[in-house]
Image (cartoon, rainbow, N blue to C red):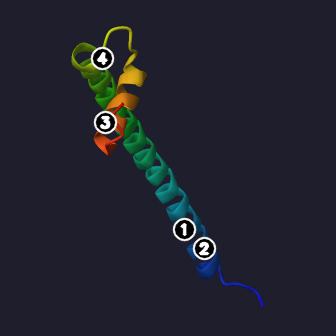
Amino acid sequence: MAKSKLVEANEKIAEKVVGGYKKIEDGVVGGYKKIEQGAVDGFTRISDGFVDRFLTKDGETVEEAKERLTREKKGDVE
């Protein structure tokens, strides 16, 4: 059965609309992910700086201090 010109035109329009929507969606999601990653990275830098200045013990790295603090919080104090 042959499609009418109107149906074919309608399908082309639908493809263009869906394609345009996908491009916009990808741009918005990509932008959100960049903003989210920037916020997480900023928080991590601030958190690491605080732990380094105020919570590390002599010779302890930031990662070691965070692990120690986690253990202390759980009640596994050495």
Residue 17, compared with residue 53, is above or below; it is below
Tag 4's secondary structure? loop
- N-terminal of the pair, mark 3 or mark 2, is 2
Tag 1's secondary structure? helix
Other-residue count near label 4 (Cα within 10 Å), few / some / many at <14 / 14–19 / ≥20: some
Distance, label 3 to label 2, CA atoms, is: 63 Å
Query: Disc 1 residue type?
Result: Ile
Distance, label 4 to label 1, CA atoms, is: 62 Å
Of marks 3 and 2, the one in the foreground: 3
Label 2 with label 4: CB-CB less than 8 Å: no
Residue 17 % position (x, y): 50, 63
Label 3 with label 1: CB-CB less than 8 Å: no
Query: Disc 4 residue type?
Result: Thr
Residue drawn at point x = 40 percent, y = 41 percent: 31
- N-terminal of the pair, mark 4 or mark 1, is 1
**Dividing the image into 4 quarters, which one contains the N terminus?**
bottom right
User: Pointer 4: what residue?
Assistant: 56
Relative to 42, 9 lies left or right: right
Residue drawn at point x = 30 percent, y = 17 percent: 56
Label 4 with label 1: CB-CB less than 8 Å: no
User: Pointer 1: what residue?
Assistant: 13
User: Pointer 3: what residue?
Assistant: 72
Tag 3's secondary structure? helix
Label 1 with label 2: CB-CB less than 8 Å: yes
Residue 13, compared with residue 64, is above or below; it is below
- N-terminal of the pair, mark 2 or mark 4, is 2
Q: In which quarter of the image is residue 38?
A: top left
User: Pointer 2: what residue?
Assistant: 11
Label 3 with label 2: CB-CB less than 8 Å: no
Distance, label 1 to label 2, CA atoms, is: 5 Å
Distance, label 2 to label 4, CA atoms, is: 64 Å
